[in-house]
Image (spheres, rainbow, N blue to C red):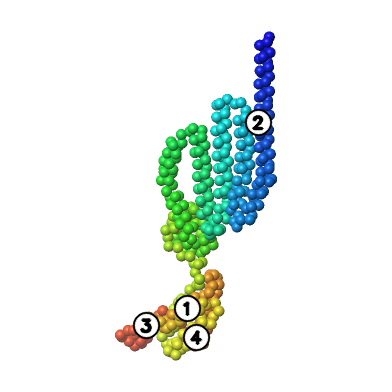
């Protein structure tokens, strides 16, 4: 009877101890939740105020990126302390420790993943004057590396051998790279285009394979809208190895041609035409004054050629054609006022015998 009472007393004490440990564990979790709330309302706000006093806003973006993971870390630490306070078996205790370490790695990974998100790379690209597509490409690579590194560390925490996995991943990556060498070439071609900047979206370009306005650029291809309104997708590996003429980036637009007049034009009238056409171009508001050439160039086969060379100030094709048309009409007016005719290709043929007399004699015989 006495022994039963002792066993009952020990069981009661043990139950009370277990219940007390459960209460303490619950209190630890409640304290963690309280600290988490205080962190959100006070500590984070105080630290955030200091970031507004700095010259850059990158520290504030990093702080916002780690706000959620820090809250999760506080809660995870509370749950871990509560579980370690309980009388768990050694195997379960070891499992809890590994689980907490894995949770910490995941939380840190989440924070780093948020740091290299969309907003921070955009700010960096603006400050360093780097194309946004480059920063987005680097962001994707960094995010992949962060996740891969986190998976590797977590696997090692659980005593998994990752060396074989990494070896297989390297061999698999090599096989994929060999199979997708064209895609890799396009990606590197895209990097060359983005870094070298031979053109931008909206530019009018000319290559040996396409001519038109650049509508979209990516790491794999460049989309060009032709003047026939067709959309041509050119692989970056192709366009990066071609000579690219960027018509949009010209500072002025060139006009040159040869105006041929007849050989019957007197020298004085030819001189007047040259001087008046040059004066017309020099006094025109839309003609660039840097280089204007109007010269009697050569004695051609069927004309006296006047060489005309100048630039328009505008680069817009429609405005360029309007200015060129206006100048052409004024040149025609000058030619008309000077009584000078435009020559056309012709050829004179001389015969040794007199065709007219022979034709006349033949006509008399027939009559």
| Count of residue discs | 4
Residue assigned mark 4: 276
> In front: mark 3 or mark 4?
4
Instruction: Identify the secondary structure beneath mark 4.
Output: helix
What is the spatial separation of the Cα atoms under label 4 and label 1, in whole angstroms?
16 Å
Residue 149 shown left or right of residue 40 in the figure: left
251 sits left or right of 28 in the view: left
Structural distance between the alpha carbons of marks 1 and 3: 38 Å
> Mark 2 or mark 4, which is nearer to you?
2
State which tag comes first along the sequence, 2 or 3.
Answer: 2
Q: CA distance from mark 1 to mark 2?
A: 88 Å
On screen, 217 above or below 163?
below
- The residue under the point 59% across, 52% down is 59
Say which element carries label 1: strand
Q: Which sits earlier in the primary sequence, circle 3 or circle 4?
A: 4
The quadrant the N terminus occupies is: top right
Residue 348 - label: 3
Q: Quarter of the image holding residue 351?
A: bottom left
């Amino acid at each position: 009877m006495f022994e039963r009472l002792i066993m009952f007393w020990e069981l009661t004490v043990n139950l009370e101890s277990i219940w007390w440990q459960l209460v303490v564990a619950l209190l630890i979790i409640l304290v963690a939740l309280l600290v988490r709330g205080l962190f959100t309302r006070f500590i984070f706000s105080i630290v955030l105020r200091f970031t507004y006093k700095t010259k850059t806003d990158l520290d504030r973006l990093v702080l916002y990126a780690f706000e959620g993971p820090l809250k999760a870390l506080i809660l995870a630490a509370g749950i871990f302390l509560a579980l370690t306070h309980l009388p768990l078996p050694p195997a379960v205790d070891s499992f809890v420790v590994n689980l907490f370490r894995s949770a910490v790695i995941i939380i840190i990974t989440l924070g780093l993943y948020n740091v290299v998100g969309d907003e921070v790379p955009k700010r960096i690209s603006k400050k360093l004057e780097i194309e946004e597509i480059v920063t987005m490409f680097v962001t994707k690579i960094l995010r992949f590396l962060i996740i891969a590194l986190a998976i590797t560390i977590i696997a090692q925490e659980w005593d998994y051998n990752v060396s074989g996995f990494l070896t297989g991943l390297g061999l698999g990556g090599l096989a994929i790279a060999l199979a997708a060498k064209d895609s890799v070439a396009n990606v590197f071609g895209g990097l060359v285009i983005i870094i070298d900047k031979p053109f931008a979206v909206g530019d009018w370009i000319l290559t040996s394979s396409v001519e038109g306005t650049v509508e979209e650029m990516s790491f794999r291809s460049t989309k060009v809208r032709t003047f026939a309104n067709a959309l041509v997708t050119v692989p970056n590996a192709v366009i990066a190895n071609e000579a690219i003429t960027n018509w949009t980036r010209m500072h002025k637009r060139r006009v040159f041609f040869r105006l041929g007049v007849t050989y019957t034009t007197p020298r004085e009238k030819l001189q007047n035409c040259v001087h008046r056409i040059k004066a017309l171009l020099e006094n025109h508001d839309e003609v660039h004054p840097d280089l204007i050439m109007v010269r009697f160039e050569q004695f051609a086969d069927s004309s006296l050629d006047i060489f005309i060379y100048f630039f328009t100030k505008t680069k817009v094709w429609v405005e360029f054609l309007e200015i060129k048309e206006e100048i052409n009409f004024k040149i025609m007016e000058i030619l008309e006022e000077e009584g000078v005719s435009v020559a056309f290709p012709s050829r004179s043929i001389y015969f040794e015998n007199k065709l007219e007399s022979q034709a006349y004699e033949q006509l008399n015989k027939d009559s």
